[in-house]
């Protein structure tokens, strides 16, 4: 099983999936047909992209009759935010050490 951050990076690494996620975050729940109109790709491709976003925990699906409606789950980004915090701490330590080194050389 892949770490959650790997799955999220994979899901958001594609520009079409990022656009779909951003659209759902900004505009709220949409069905596949509405998303296809603005996505610039075919309906089967939109469905595949939504499946990847759903697997990553970034989107949730709701069936209503024959249609499936999708909603963004911004809280799905929490593992990514934690990863960014850890990386920021790592690089802050490194940059502080580099600054100390350059100060000594001056």
Image (cartoon, grey):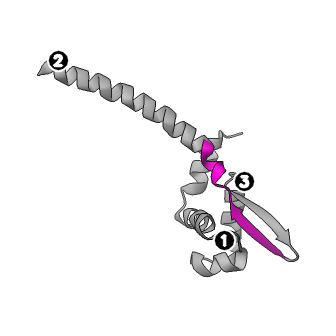
Q: Is residue 83 left or right of residue 64?
A: left
Tell me: residue 67, above or below residue 106.
below
| Residue 46 disc label | 1
In which quadrant of the rendered view does residue 64 lie? bottom right
Cα distance between the residues tagged 1 and 3: 14 Å
Which of the numbered marks, if any, corresponds to residue 55? 3
Residue located 71% across and 75% down the image: 32
Which residue in the protein does label 2 denote?
104
Q: Given contact means CB atoms under 8 Å apart, are the residues at marks 1 and 3 in contact? A: no
Q: Toward the viewer: 21 or 16? A: 21
Q: Residue at x 61, y 44 (%)?
A: 78
Where residue 102 appears, x then y in whole percent? Answer: 19, 24
Q: CA distance from mark 1 to mark 2?
A: 56 Å
**Where is residue 81 drawn, in percent x and y?**
55, 42
Task: Indicate which disc, 1 or 2, sits on the residue closer to the N terminus.
Answer: 1
Q: Quadrant of the N terminus?
A: top right
């Amino acid at each position: 099983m892949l770490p959650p951050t790997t799955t999220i990076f994979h899901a958001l690494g594609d520009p079409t999936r990022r656009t779909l996620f951003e659209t759902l975050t900004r505009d709220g729940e949409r069905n596949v047909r509405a998303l296809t109109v603005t996505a610039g790709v075919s309906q089967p491709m939109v469905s595949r992209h939504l499946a990847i976003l759903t697997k990553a925990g970034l989107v949730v699906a709701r069936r209503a009759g024959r249609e499936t409606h999708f909603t963004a789950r911004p809280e799905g980004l929490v593992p990514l935010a934690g990863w960014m915090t850890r990386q920021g701490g790592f690089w802050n330590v490194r940059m502080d050490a580099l600054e100390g080194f350059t100060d000594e050389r001056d």
